[in-house]
Amino acid sequence: MSTNQASYVRAAMIEASPAPSLESGVASWLRKNLFATPKDTVLTIISLLILAWLVPPAIQWLFIDAAWSGGGRGVCATLSQGGSQPEGWSGACWAFVNAKFAQFLFGRYPLDERWRPALVGILFVLLLVPMLIPRIPYKGLNALLLLGALPILAAILLPGGWFGLTYVETPLWGGLMVTLVLSFVGIAVSLPLGILLALGRRSNMPVIKMLCTVFIEVIRGVPLITVLFMASVMLPLFLPQGVTFDKFLRALIGVSLFASAYMAEVVRGGLQAIPKGQYEGADSLGLSFWQKMGFIVLPQALKLVIPGIVNTFIGLFKDTSLVSIIGMFDLLGIVRLNFSDTNWASAVTPLTGLIFAGFVFWLFCFGMSRYSGFMERLLDRSQR
Amino acid sequence: MAIGVTNAPERSKSSGSIINDPQVRGIFYQAITIIILAALIYWIVDNTVDNLRRANIASGYDFVRSRAGFDVGQSLISFTSDSTYGRALLVGFINTLLVAITGIITATIIGFLVGIGRLSHNWIIAKLSLAYVEVFRNIPPLLVIFFWYSGVLSILPQARDALALPFDIFLSNRGVAFPRPIAEEGAEYTLIAFVIAIAASVFFARYARQRQLATGERLPVLWTVLGLIVGLPLVTFLVTGAPITFDIPVAGKFNLTGGSVVGPEFMSLFLALSFYTAAFIAEIVRAGIRGVSKGQTEAAHALGIRPALTTRLVVVPQAMRIIIPPLTSQYLNLTKNSSLAVAIGYADLVAVGGTILNQTGQSIEIVSIWLIVYLSLSLATSLFMNWYNARMALVER
């Protein structure tokens, strides 16, 4: 079969010509995304003006004019305030954060004993990182170490009093360490307790159902600060004379109970979303209640509500800052305590300290929310 | 017929031991729970009564009638240190409501703006809104309060060289001072006119609706209502001879005198709660608008409805159905977060209660008052939500 080569049929494809200049490149992007309509143009110009008014002074204040090193308030105060900076100076006092950094991490934990929280912290990171990366094997062992061995080790190392370790009482604890311990325990307690409460609220037994509902609704209806006040003022009243509870432990109980009520509602949402057929299927296989929940319903329900669970974790992490109101020194509390340090008190110290604390909180919360988005995509088994 | 009629076999009760009967087990578990709970409550009550007797604290609510002996920084109703504890709690409750209501209004405005901004086609607006949400959602509200309180408001100039803003408003580390309107004789007519205008607006809106249903003709409701509510009081105000004077703040040697002052405690709490909650409201608004399927907009356009009307009549009503329930729970969150006032000394319900608790030791009573107030607020909110959901639920076949 001979190829019939007609002269009017093109033998070779011609090169695609580049897109018109209005449809590609920077100019087109700008036109489409910033100046599409007159209204857009106005909005863009207004936003740019706001940014120009806000960002350069902020960078100037945070970095260029900032006092990075120094041994006292002198570097962060103007001449008339008794410092070395020129009149009218204003900038971040990073020297303050630098000097107090260890305290922001460990609070007033004794200097010689700080290796203990540091060791726990390093182990925590070493165990948490492989836990979070899905490809790394031995998840079961890892979880056992992270949720079983590490808390026991921390309970021995942090307060001390055993094995020749000096006892460090909890009022001396502080800083990021307290924030993390509170959040870790809060998370570890609130998830299982929340699941139990959610199951109880959907139970067929009226007494259990009523108790769980009342608990959840009362806790969710009041602010955390009243729960903390309750834990710190009323708990001692409820106990027999002479039995005292550590203040830190009381805050832990308050925070954990508060978070578990919220967790219960999140989990209940997941339980309700599971089709009835799943429950009936499990029943028809003759599974017991706990088998049905543990193997069939909860794995599906919890997967559905991962965003809600992580949001509750983030809320819990942010809420730990409230313990500074009942006189404990978490990260925010210890930063504020240092505002009154006469060696460092200056006009810019509070703002710098708060920006630092805010950045640390932000890092943790933002990291958690990003990781939850990642997990959600990973576990998504829907046929989309 | 030899075959006897056999009834279906009765559910045999003897298929296993009584331990395996789910009903019996259920009753057994519940009985155990009740017994444990009763024992726990008895133990707690016993301990509490014992502890209270030792500490010499008389239980009961009689203390609300005794003299408070402390001052409250900011109060909408008159309060001196000679007033009773009960009145102090009332002041606290009103302050809680004040900061909650003003905060809710501002948070809603910022939240809707930012939420719509996140859906904007304008790249820079969308990114700015995203940055706002991600910053404020991930920082504790308490820290935001301190940011305003000790970071911003406390380094403002002293009262004697306060920053002068337009309309005789002064900004200093004592707060914001602004002219206070003083009603003179005849001012009440303006108020009456305002009430009449609102009533007339309601009637007009109803009439317009009936008219539209009957004839399909749309009356300009928005402009009429605006004209009524703004115009009528304004005309009355001018006709009666502008019977309002202003008490203008004046910078003195040490302090500003005259005018009304809003303290830095209220300002920082109000700003922090508004900015913090607005980030959450923005996400709710975004989800609500995204939740209305594109087909709705396209169908409206296919029917020839103009874009502005499509938004108003097709998208917004359906988006509101998704937005309102989580929005109310954010409002409730803001109200509960207003209890953080105790950290900076704004006299809200929790702060006042804490002071009384320290003075009298009536911890159970104070905590119960807190619980009752906040629980009623949240109960009212959930009642409203149920009512709204029932009203707004999709009517399906």
Image: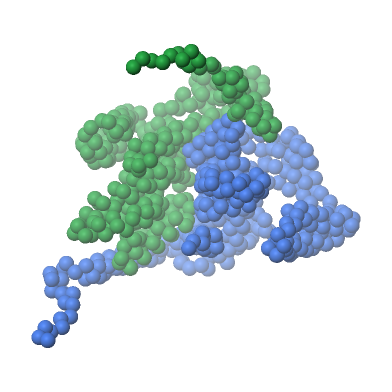
Chain colours: A green, B blue
Q: Where, quadrant-wise, is the N terminus of chain A in this rendering?
A: top left
Q: Which residue is drawn at 41% across and 15% down?
A: A4
> Given the current orientation, which residue lies at the most extreme bottom position?
B1
Identify which residue, A215 or A130, lies in the foreground: A130
Residue at the location (70% across, 42% down)? B176
Point 50% across, 25% down: residue: A96
Residue A52 in the image: x percent, y percent? 64, 25
Find residue A285 and report its image quarter.
bottom left
Question: How many numbered tags mark residues here?
Answer: 0
Please name the residue shown 59% across and 34% down the image.
Answer: B121
Left or right: A16 as drawn, with respect to A190: right
Q: Position of residue A32 (x, y in %)?
A: 60, 28
Rendering coords of residue A36 (x, y %): 64, 30
The quarter holding residue B24 reads bottom left
Residue A205 appears anywhere in the view: yes
Query: Which quadrant holds residue A210?
Result: bottom left
Q: Which of B374 and B193 is in front in this view?
A: B193
The quadrant the C terminus of chain A occupies is top left
Can residue B366 be seen? Answer: no
Looking at the image, residue B374 lies above or below residue B147: below
- In depth, the one of A36 and A83 nearer the eye is A36
Horizontal and vertical percent for residue B250? 79, 41
